[in-house]
Image (cartoon, grey):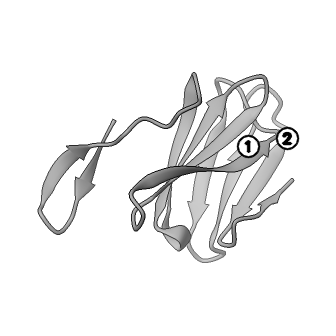
Amino acid sequence: MARRVKKCNQWEKLRPAKPGRNTMVYQYFTARSGLLSLARQPVGTLRFFSDGKQEWSSPGEIAVQGYHSLARNNPFRQEVLFVGGCDPNVFSFVQRQPAIEL
């Protein structure tokens, strides 16, 4: 995976997020200036790459996981919505503050 660096107008390789396997969803989170990744373990595992710190962190696990999962950034509400593809009745919000709302 690569990302575009605005100030030097070029692409650079993004370090992999570990642990995690079978990453299903990537979504840029404008309110926290970073990239969220949803990996499928036995449960959904979130990883966050901070543009400022240039490192991955683990906000925690969410109920959403699976191949058909979906994430959408809402800059107005400053949150990201995750919806489970294996179970469309399961959803989670990640808000600007490092908290997960199930």
What type is the residue that disc 2 sits on? Val
* Rendered view: 67 above or below 95: above
Residue at the image point whose x is 83% and y is 30% from the top: 87
Residue at the image point whose x is 57% and y is 22% from the top: 22
Residue at the image point whose x is 61% and y is 47% from the top: 71
Which of 17 and 34 lies nearest the eye of the viewer? 17
Q: Earlier in the sequence, mark 2 or mark 1?
A: 1
Q: Tag 2, which secondary structure?
A: loop
Q: Tag 1, which secondary structure?
A: strand
Which of 92 and 12 lies nearest the eye of the viewer? 12
Residue 9 appears in which quarter of the rendering?
bottom left
Q: Position of residue 4 (x, y in %)?
A: 24, 53
- Mark 2–mark 1 distance (CA, rounded to whole Å): 6 Å
Q: Position of residue 85 (x, y in %)?
A: 72, 30
* Rendered view: 56 above or below 5: above
Which of 70 and 45 lies nearest the eye of the viewer? 45
Side of 29 relative to 14 (left or right): right
Task: Give the labeled residue for mark 1.
Answer: 83
Q: Assign the N terminus to one quadrant of the image.
A: top left
Q: Residues within 10 Å of mark 2 (few under 14, many from 20)?
A: some
Q: Residues within 10 Å of mark 1 (few under 14, many from 20)?
A: many
Q: Position of residue 93 (x, y in %)?
A: 75, 58
Side of 38 relative to 2 (left or right): right
In the picture, the disc for residue 99 is none
Task: Give the labeled residue for mark 2.
Answer: 90
* Rendered view: 39 above or below 80: above
Tell me, yes or no, whether the two marked residues, 2 and 1, touch with CB atoms within 8 Å: yes
Q: Position of residue 21 (x, y in %)?
A: 58, 23
Residue 80 appears in which quarter of the rendering?
bottom right
What type is the residue that disc 1 sits on? Val
